[in-house]
Image: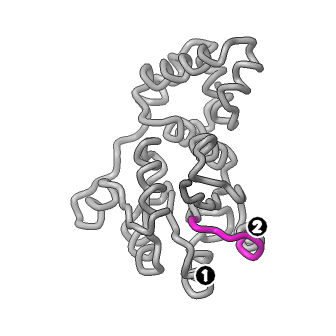
């Protein structure tokens, strides 16, 4: 029997919480014990539940995720933290590592890369994406603006935009199938075509672009 790792997701954007939850759904080795948006809610879960890994955003509205990392490094050293942030700058990365974070990923990481990070951090290993590693040694430069990806999103068909909007809202393939009267396989095919047509690495990347630019689909 596989170990069941208990995961807490702390991010103030519901679409990100739901997308991570969707990725982990159905994998018997993981159990999500909470999906919360504030430090207060995170503390409540931590006070009541055993947590092995906390996937933490650094920007939580008016709060700083580093506060939770700082307090937990002293009070709950057994928890492994994986930082997932759109503010992946050297200062945040270095502070997170100093405070004991096991991993750090930018929010435009692919789904496969995020899963590798979760798997390694659950096992107590460290995981930093290649982009983060390059940044730490001074060879990283910011990606160009996402204008090209925005254009590709707007070039999707009406149905593909509907599917993308549903995914961003956290709906599963089953939910999408019920919502639009299509089969689950058709919903999966739509998702695959959306990634292929936009060139995005993951729906998390698409969700971030939609969110940051307030795109109307």
Secondary structure category for the residue under label 1: loop
Query: Which residue in the protein does label 2 denote?
Result: 41
Secondary structure category for the residue under label 2: helix
Q: Indicate whether 154 appears above or below 74.
A: above
Question: Is-magenta flag for residue 32?
Answer: no
Residue at 35% from the left image edge and 55% from the top image edge = 129
Query: Which residue in the protein does label 1 denote?
Result: 76
Mark 1 vs mark 2: which is more N-terminal? 2
Q: Residues within 10 Å of mark 2 (few under 14, many from 20)?
A: some
Q: Indicate whether 199 appears above or below 212.
A: above
Residue at 69% from the left image edge and 12% from the top image edge = 182
Query: Which quadrant of the figure contains the N terminus?
Result: bottom right
| Magenta part of the chain | 45-53
Percent x, y for residue 97?
41, 75
Query: Which quadrant of the figure contains the C terminus?
Result: top right
Question: Is-magenta flag for residue 49?
Answer: yes
| Quarter of the figure with residue 184 | top right
| Quarter of the figure with residue 176 | top right
Residue farthest bottom in this picture: 74
Percent x, y for residue 56?
57, 63
| Quarter of the figure with residue 134 | bottom left
Q: Indicate whether 69 appears above or below 53.
A: below
Percent x, y for residue 65?
59, 69
């Amino acid at each position: 029997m596989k170990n069941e790792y208990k995961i807490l997701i702390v991010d103030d954007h519901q679409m990100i919480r739901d997308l991570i939850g969707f990725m982990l759904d159905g994998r018997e080795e993981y159990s999500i014990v909470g999906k919360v948006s504030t430090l207060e809610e995170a503390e409540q879960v931590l006070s009541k539940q055993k947590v092995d890994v906390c996937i933490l955003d650094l920007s939580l509205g008016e709060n700083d995720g580093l506060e939770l990392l700082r307090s937990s490094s002293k009070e709950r050293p057994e928890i492994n933290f994986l930082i997932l942030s759109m503010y992946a700058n050297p200062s945040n990365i270095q502070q997170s590592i100093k405070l004991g974070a096991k991993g750090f990923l930018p929010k435009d990481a692919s789904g496969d890369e995020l899963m590798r990070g979760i798997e390694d951090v659950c096992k107590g290993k460290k995981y930093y994406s290649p982009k983060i590693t390059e940044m730490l040694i001074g060879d990283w430069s910011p990606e160009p603006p996402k204008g090209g990806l925005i254009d590709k999103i707007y070039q999707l068909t009406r149905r593909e935009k509907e599917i993308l909007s549903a995914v961003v809202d956290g709906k599963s393939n089953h939910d999408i199938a019920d919502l639009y009267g299509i089969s689950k396989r058709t919903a999966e095919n739509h998702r695959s075509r959306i990634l292929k047509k936009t060139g995005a690495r993951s729906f998390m990347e698409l969700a971030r672009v939609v969110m940051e630019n307030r795109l109307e689909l």
